Structures are given as C-alpha cells and as structure tokens.
Image (cartoon, rainbow, N blue to C red):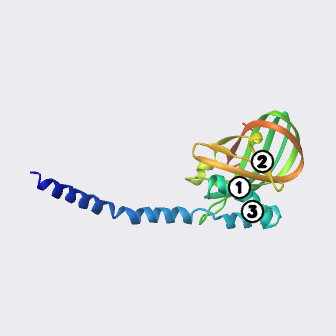
Amino acid sequence: MKVFLPLRLAAALIVGVAFMQPATPARAATSDQTTSQTYEQNEIVNAVAGFFGVTTKVAAKAVERVFAERGKPNAYIIGEEGAGAFVGGLRYGKGELTRKNETSVPVYWQGPSIGFDFGGNASKTFVLVYNLGATDDIYRRFPGAEAGGYFIAGIGVNYQQNGDIILAPMRTGVGLRGGVNLGYLHYSPERHWLPL
C-alpha cells in the first residue's frame, strides 16, 4: 500500500496541473481586455491639458497623484459646473461620459452640501471614473467631502464613492469659495433642478 501512495500523489499533481493550464490564457485575455478598456496616464494627461488649457506638465502633476492612488480609470467625464454656498450649498453641472470604443453619453449632476462653506464658483470639471460596469451605473448619488480634497498646480481634486465606483473630480475655474462641506452629487441622464 505504501508503494502506491507516491504514485497517487504524482497522479493527483499531474491532473491538478493539467486542469490549471487552460486557466492561464483565460486570465491573460481578461487582463488584456481590462487594459484595453482603461486609460493610460499619458492619455489622461493630454486630455486634461487640452480641456483645462494648461501645459501637460501642470496636468501631469494632478493626474500623477490620482493614478498613484487609484490606478487606471475606465471612463471619464468632461463638463462644466456652477456652485454656491452660504452654510448650505448647491452644485449643478453637465458634461459627457466617455469610454473607450463607445459613444459618449450626456450626464448631468446636481446636489446639496452643508458645512462651513461660503461663496460661489464656476468650474471646468474633468472626472476620472473607476470600476464603472454598465454605463448606466454612473446614474446614482455619490457622497463626498470638499475638505477631503487637495490642490495641485491650481487644479482641485477630491474623491466620491458609491459601492465599487469611485469618481475623482478635478476642477479649475473662477470664483471665490472657501471652507469645508459634506454633501453628495446625483448624476443623472437628464437635467434635474431639484438638487435632491
């Protein structure tokens, strides 16, 4: 009986390896497919520079930080927004969601905020989108805090998250607004004036 034990172990190992071999190409294909649907850092740097009208060096500073923290996005939103606050605030925006090999779709956002926050501003907004499954999954509420953001070369960056989907809005614009606030933005396929 002891003679057959090594043979059984060898047979089990061979069978196990045989079953594992086909999985390797499938994993590689999935990785290639994911990579082909995400954006490289240089693609985003060029898009941000062109949209904000800044040099690629300035855009790279903001984009590098987000890529270091979150990796490659699989979509982005380009748009404009306006916001104002006096303790309670409102923000409204509109733009287009872009994904590789897909037609861009319109997206609107609106939402309230509350905190020690005063003033108003108009901004160009470039939002990196992470872990977006179906395109319609963008249409939901994303909580966030302005105090959790940072400024790099005049571009403000913060994060919003709902489930696995993470948004990294980058903003630059005109106006005067200061303080900290908590709130959310509701992204939708059409404009809503009610900010809730």
Q: In this view, does 71 lie above or below 110?
A: below
Who's the residue at 56% across and 53% down the image? 134
Q: Which residue lies furthest to the left in this view?
A: 1
Q: Nearer the viewer, residue 191 or 91?
A: 91
**Tag of residue 65:** 1
Answer yes or no: do the residues labelled 1 and 2 have beta carbons within 8 Å?
yes
Residue type at tag 3: Ala
Q: Nearer the viewer, residue 16 or 195?
A: 16
Give the Cα distance between marks 3 and 1.
8 Å
Of callouts 3 and 1, the N-terminal one: 3
Q: Within 10 angstroms of label 2, few (less than 14), some, or many (20 or more) residues?
A: some
**Tag of residue 107:** none
Residue type at tag 1: Arg
Answer yes or no: do the residues labelled 2 and 3 have beta carbons within 8 Å?
no
Who's the residue at 57% across and 46% down the image? 164
Q: Within 10 angstroms of label 1, few (less than 14), some, or many (20 or more) residues?
A: few
* Left or right: 87, with 187 as reference point: right
Who's the residue at 69% across and 51% down the image? 168
Q: Mark 2 points at which residue?
A: 150
Give the Cα distance between marks 2 and 3.
15 Å
Q: Name the residue under label 3.
A: 60
Who's the residue at 83% across and 64% down the image? 54
